[in-house]
């Protein structure tokens, strides 16, 4: 391993180990990009900031590549063709659902948030039925209440569009169309940056497919 590190042009085996550790922390779709501290504006004081920014930039850029782009287009088609659109999420996922609902509401009141009361879960969306769609967000550690509501709506024939962090998540298996976004970052908490970016793209695509004149509606 020491000879391999030298052959790669690294100063020591510790450098090679650090690169491998960083790569494993990141999503499999994002490759490690070594930051050259000799670049202008990059030094010991702000290299950590630059590292996080580069990681998040790479994650958001991946949304434009397959299969993420295909997932976004498919989800937008489901939402655009629905009679009514509902949005739901709990805890940190709530802001994702709320953001989509707010953007669509500004266009022409095309989405509504679902407020789930623990004592009234079954009647959270009494009018939802086949022909409707629901955008649901859920990230690890997954909310069981969110997955339960998604399954209930799916049984009614409501098309579930999921924004989640893994194809193996319970919500993704329930969804008619799913968008998988990375939430890992250089921090101790999950990152919602890519999920927010995906939500903005999804709202834009949905509005386009609905033929909404966004500029006029926003004005």
Image (cartoon, rainbow, N blue to C red):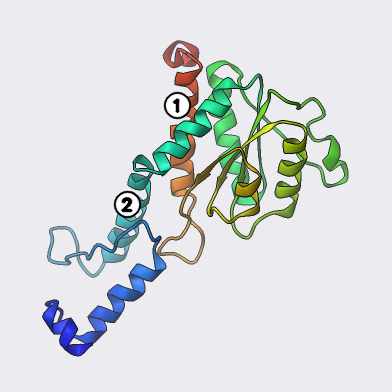
In x, y percent, where is residue 35?
Answer: 21, 64
Q: What residue is drawn where x is 28% and y is 73%? A: 19
For label 2, the residue is 58
Mark 1 Cα within 10 Å, few/some/many (few <14, many 20+)?
many
For label 1, the residue is 205
**23 w.r.t. 95: above or below:** below
Q: CA distance from mark 2 to mark 1?
A: 21 Å
Q: What residue is drawn where x is 17% and y is 67%? A: 37
| Residue in front for this viewpoint, 127 or 91 | 127
- Secondary structure at badge 1 equals helix
**153 w.r.t. 57: above or below:** above
Q: What residue is drawn where x is 45% and y is 26%? A: 205
**Could you tell me if the residues under marks 2 and 1 are in contact, i.e. CB atoms within 8 Å?**
no
**204 w.r.t. 67: above or below:** above
N-terminal of the pair, mark 2 or mark 1, is 2
In x, y percent, where is residue 68?
Answer: 42, 43
Position of 38 with respect to 217 (left or right) is: left
How many numbered marks are there? 2
**172 w.r.t. 190: above or below:** above
Position of 150 with respect to 28 (left or right) is: right
In x, y percent, where is residue 112?
Answer: 66, 27
* Residue 216 occupies quadrant: top left
Q: Which mark is residue 182?
A: none
- Secondary structure at badge 2 equals helix
Please identify the residue farthest to the bottom as the structure is shown: 2
| Residue in front for this viewpoint, 218 or 128 | 128
Q: What residue is drawn where x is 41% and y is 44%? A: 67
* Residue 64 occupies quadrant: top left
Position of 8 with respect to 195 (left or right) is: left
Mark 2 Cα within 10 Å, few/some/many (few <14, many 20+)?
some
In x, y percent, where is residue 11?
Answer: 15, 82
* Residue 110 occupies quadrant: top right
């Amino acid at each position: 391993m020491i000879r391999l590190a030298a052959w790669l042009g690294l100063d020591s085996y510790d450098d090679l180990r650090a690169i491998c550790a960083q790569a494993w922390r990141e999503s499999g779709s994002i490759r490690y990009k070594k930051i050259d501290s000799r670049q202008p504006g990059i030094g010991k004081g702000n290299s950590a900031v630059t590292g996080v920014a580069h990681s998040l930039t790479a994650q958001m850029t991946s949304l434009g590549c397959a299969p993420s782009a295909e997932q976004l287009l498919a989800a937008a088609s489901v939402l655009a063709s629905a009679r009514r659109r509902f949005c739901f999420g709990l805890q940190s996922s709530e802001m994702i659902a709320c953001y989509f609902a707010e953007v669509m509401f500004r266009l022409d009141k095309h989405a509504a948030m679902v407020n789930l009361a623990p004592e009234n879960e079954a009647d959270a969306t009494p009018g939802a039925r086949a022909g409707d769609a629901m955008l649901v967000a859920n990230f690890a550690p997954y909310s069981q209440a969110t997955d339960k509501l998604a399954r209930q709506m799916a049984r009614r024939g409501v098309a579930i569009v999921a924004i989640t962090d893994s194809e193996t998540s319970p919500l993704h298996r329930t969804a008619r169309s799913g968008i998988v976004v990375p939430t890992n970052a250089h921090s101790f908490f999950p990152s919602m940056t890519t999920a927010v970016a995906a939500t903005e793209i999804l709202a834009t695509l949905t509005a386009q497919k609905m033929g909404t004149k966004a500029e006029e509606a926003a004005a």
